[in-house]
Amino acid sequence: MRATVIHAPHDIRVEDVPDPVVRFPTDAVVRVLRACICGSDLWAYRGESAREPGQRIGHEFLGVVEEAGAEVNGFLAGDLVVAPFVWSDGNCEYCAEGLQTSCPQGGFWGSVGSDGGQGEAVRVPFADGTLVKLPAAAASDDHLLTALLALSDVLGTGHHAAVGAGVKRGSTVAVVGDGAVGLCGVLAAKRLGAERIIALGRHQVRTDIARTFGATDVVAERGEAAVDAVRELTRGQGAHAVIEAVGTEQSMRTAVEITRDGGAVGYVGVPHGSGTGLDLSVMFDRNIALRGGVAPVRAYIPELLPDVLSGAVDPSPVFDLTVGIDGVPGGYKAMDDRTALKVLIKP
């Protein structure tokens, strides 16, 4: 089959690799119908996250079960499924608590020795604990398939940030970051009943999507100017809930400074250079909470799926460029150049 591999920074290739097979009776093999490139993939692309030459890449996909192992009880060949970006056994204490990202037997697609999502097929360990079945009719609905793909990562990650930030009905929310996760954070905050949503971003195409998703205000400034702008919009107090979806020192510092006393920051931006972005004395004095981390999207899919199927929540606008499997290297360049927000892959 064809699959995306990374050889070095800025060296993404699509190569012929061995077809995946069922190795263990709890495995399934899924033929990929939709995949995509994540902003976090760019850290490997830029050389800021280490990868072995020839390692697979990509962690968001949905598709059709081609084969299921003898101990797989929940899926049959032909089932349409979505995979969260981490596989998990579904049986451990962490999985029972809804923290599948800490499953001792879990792992990330594209890790050494595993298949990546940006290919024609994927071996799925612990299929019963990992995959979520989708309605068969969705396979013939191109728009719906694209929206459902967001359940594999960005929609659940935006939701995780909103939950961590304590978004509730009537909240004032600020979202730091205008990437796909930040935009899905806007969508999640709206779904949870936020009354006012302030989106921080400088790119009009992206902030236009934020407004479509429910943002009531847009702040284009950065740094202290952004803090001043948010405080001006909130009577000097800041937002009850702040979603941090970037992961830099500056973005985390901004998130804390625009949080209302007694509020919370929900952080899901993959940390890169953010080690000194937090001043605990400031957070202590102002009773600001910090919650977040790697989103256990497997726990959120059952909650979010009905709204995506009904059209009440439609994250599909975050996908603004579509490529075939051989167009994936160009898709990485487009996202790195910021000429694309999030690239959809149709193998």
Image: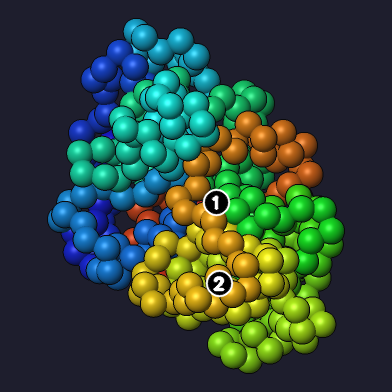
Q: Mark 2 points at which residue?
A: 283
- Quarter of the image where one finds residue 197: bottom right
Residue at 70% of width from left, 40% of height from top?
Answer: 308
Quarter of the image containing the C terminus? top left
In x, y percent, where is residue 282? 54, 77
Farthest residue toward the top? 70
In what quadrant of the picture does the N terminus appear?
A: top left
Q: State the residue at coordinates (68%, 66%).
A: 262
Label 2: few (<14), some (14–19) or many (≥20) C-alpha neighbours in 10 Å? some
Q: What residue type is labelled 1?
A: Thr
The one nearer the camera, 196 or 142, is 196
Which residue is the site of mark 1? 157
Mark 2: which secondary structure?
helix
Q: In this view, does 194 lie above or below 84?
A: below
Q: What amino acid is labelled 2 in the image?
A: Met
Q: Which residue occupies the extreme front position in the image?
A: 285
